Image (spheres, grey):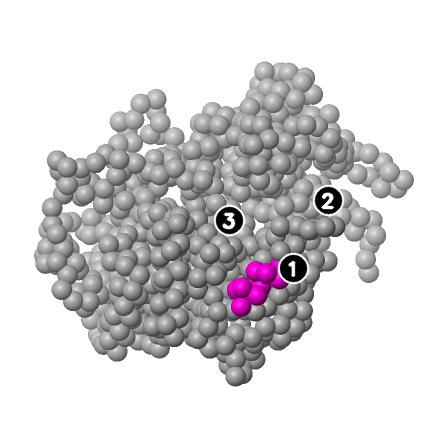
Amino acid sequence: MVDAVRLLQLVINGAAAGCIYGLIALGFVLIYKATEMINFAQGDIMMLGGFFAFALIAHFGLNYWVGAALAIALTAAFGFALDALILRRVIGQPQFAVVMLTLGLGFIFRAVAGITWGYDSVGFETPFTNRTVKLGGLVLGADNLSIIVGTVVLCAVLYMFFSRTRLGIAMQASSQNQLAAYYMGIPVRTVFSLIWAISSGVAAVAAILLAPVSMIDVNMGFLGIKAFAAAVLGGFGSIPGALVGGVIVGVSEQLSGYYLPAGFQEVTANVVLLGTLVLRPQGLFSDALRKRV
Amino acid sequence: MRTLFRTSYRQDLRLWRHGGDLFWYGLLGIVLLLIPAALGEFYVGELGGVFIFAIAGVGLMMLTGYTGLVNLGHAAFLGIGAYTNAILLHAGVPFIVTLPAAGLVTAFAGVLIGIPTLRMSGLYLAIATLAFGAIVGTVLQKWDSVTGGFDGFAVPTPSIFGWPIEGATGVYYLSLAVLVFVLWVGANVLRTPLGRAMVAIRDSEISAQSMGINLALYKTVAFAISAGMTGLAGALFAHYVRFLAPDSFDILLSIQFVTIVFVGGLGSLHGAIFGALFVRLLPQAIAIVRDDLPFGIGRMPGLEPSLFGLILVLCILFEPAGIYGRWLKTKRWFQEYPLHRRAAKRRQKTYARSERLR
Amino acid sequence: MSLFHAEDISIRFGGIRAVDAVSFDVEPGEVFSIIGPNGAGKTTIFNLISRIYDPTSGRLMLDGQDITRTPPYRIASLGIARTFQNIELFTNATLLQNLLIGRHCHSKASFLAQLCFLPSVQREEIIHREKAEDVIAFLGLERYRDTLIANLPYGVRKVVELGRALCTEPRLLLLDEPSSGLNVEETELMGFWIEDIKKDLGITVIMVEHDMNLVRQVSDRVMALNYGRMMALGTPAEVQNHPEVIRAYIGGEA
């Protein structure tokens, strides 16, 4: 006997969690599409964004919206610097090297965050904490709702940006063919750093949206591993795919936690991941690529 | 500078290039055999740990360094080998059987993860192995009836034909023997068509196929060999720690293995040894200088993983050939002095090569 | 009977017919060239023959044996070797190792024997080394034997690509634009080698080429393709004077 209200509750919780996975996956996919670098530190950049927001809002007492905007900007600048100073140097090295580099950077970020803000969980006041919204018989947490709405808004903005603005189109060009983009006068390396900036900004948004639901702490970057499942499910080249993938993973997790015996919820994301990789490696939305010899 | 005179093809097949090599390796062997007589139990124990990690490092090197298959879940193989060995010993099976059995069971697990990942490359393979490692870790935790779950699993003392292998010294000699065996097998792989096929797969899958190499078969074999070697390391690891806890085979351990392979020098057997030395001795080095560090850094939690990260980053930025690469360059400097050209060491500018289309 | 027979071979990528009902025979011991403008489908035919692509229709026969559905890794042991237009060498290995990988289809040792490096494996290794050295001598590559491919200039890499294909001891050799990127002397040398391969080694050659001098110098017969379809088939002189071929290369009245 399926309780419709309970089911809907699970779906909404799952969708909210999935939006977070999707946002992290989004940042991930942006970088991969452009530079073919796998940023294993994406989750940790999200963590840093969360801490920046905490410092600005809770510590320095700024207004929520101002603090959030500033935190996003700061994280974006951080991402830009990361690419310009460190990641640019490893272009041309095998992919494995870049994986290791970002893994190493993740360690460093966690340590720096731990030194600066300590290893305990922290939180800050948001307009959505502990508030509920009534929708015709359903009582939904404003925090979950804010995550979903915020994600949709952000994705719409990004879509507009990539398809309508010059910079967005330049980014698309650079990610498809670097040499041609250079010839067209696009400053490819700056564009890539800007992509890193956007990706980091998106990660910060994820952290800020997540804050009312779960606290900010040094290890929250491990959500990044679930974001892989989202990115793979969506097909690694696809931005809307990453989001859809995230929601599917999030909802599956909630459903398996409720309907399957204990212990299965933990492995759900990984099982979805492996399953996708085996059954349909190009994900739900992209086409398989083939080398021309 | 030494000029190599080669008079027969058989000479090129040998594991040592000339008499000098043989001399130094022989000397090294004698020193290693005598160490337990000279150093205290603590250092002997630590070296035993280095050997075990080197064995697992050679296993990963076969897969990642030679076949080009990234594995971010390598700790899973160590865990499977460790638990197989411990469980069989507990059931009364003699050690002389459980050791190879651990290797074989883990090799089989390697085949299990190898088969679904046959068509994956680069990024996807890395993520899939990550997921596999996590799943195995969870299985080891939750399957309490067999593995003892979070309560842990006490490992019985092994004995070979009635002789118990006890203490740090016992683990030391046993690990050294297995390490030599694994290095010999690894070197054999490299000088036969099997190893060349693996290298071919790493560099160009399409032309490897045109040369007659069955990708699916060789990738599976690479996984099997890699897992088998690491399974042996796992069995020894069980005796090293004497008490198995399932959460020790986590992603952090997998990253340590990847560090071994990378910092040591990707693509060489020596690299696995150097890497293992580095990864195992770094925590010791940190412990020694900990109190002398300024700003109270030494007392900070999370110092070890952050130093790991820092060294990894510096290594990739400045010396991607790893410790072995640096060793070769230094040797070359000494050999060519004073005619050494600085430009020989400079890295060539490389352009991004799309991995999406291999 | 012809050594190689392609019958009505076609492949489509989405809506594009890259190769459209092409049929041709290659006689044993001849040099057969395929020419055509860029995008005509020449390399696609090679990819079909070496089984990297599956044809959507048609048949491929090698010496009477149907190879239309053979998996790509079995092609080498059947006696077909190829070179690649954009050089697909193993860049992190030495020249010698590349050639030895070319010997792979002739290696018979079991995995276990290789892991233990048994004397039978050692003997085989020496035989492989001797054969590879024969190829090195044939192509004059002695001084580069132990150099990593990554450190070799383009011209030498093209020759190594040829050498690697020769190491498989093929019956049929597919050369994809052997002279692209080579200067005049290197191209001349390549022409001599192709002639030697035909006369001394008795290997049948199918060659995709743009350099008409080279085609005229070495080919016995030529096939011209355009838009995936065959335009002309015959001796070099016949094909070069074929009106459709002239129109495709130089253009004609609309």
Relative to C138, say whether A20 is above or below.
Answer: above
Residue C185 in view, yes or no: yes
Q: Residue at x 52, y 74 (%)?
A: C26
Judging from the image, mark 1 belongs to the subunit labelled C
For mark 1, what is the residue?
C243
For mark 2, what is the residue?
A15
For mark 3, what is the residue?
B355
> CA–CA distance between discs 2 and 3?
33 Å
> CA–CA distance between discs 1 and 2?
66 Å
User: Of discs 3 and 1, which sits in the foreground?
Assistant: 1
| Marks 2 & 3, CB-CB < 8 Å contact | no
User: Of discs 2 and 3, which sits in the foreground?
Assistant: 3
Magenta-colored segment: predominant secondary structure:
helix
Q: Residue at x 35, y 30 (%)?
A: B299
The residue range painted magenta reads C235-245
| Marks 1 & 2, CB-CB < 8 Å contact | no
User: Of discs 1 and 2, which sits in the foreground?
Assistant: 1
- Amino acid type indicated by mark 1: Pro
| Crowd class of label 3 (few under 14; some 14 to 19; many from 20; radius 10 Å) | some
**Residue toward you, A44 or A127:** A44
Q: Are marks 1 and 2 on the same chain?
A: no
- Amino acid type indicated by mark 3: Glu
Q: Is residue B61 left or right of residue C216?
A: left
Q: Position of residue A267 (x, y in %)?
A: 59, 55
Q: Residue at x 29, y 26 (%)?
A: B293
Q: Residue at x 32, y 47 (%)?
A: C151
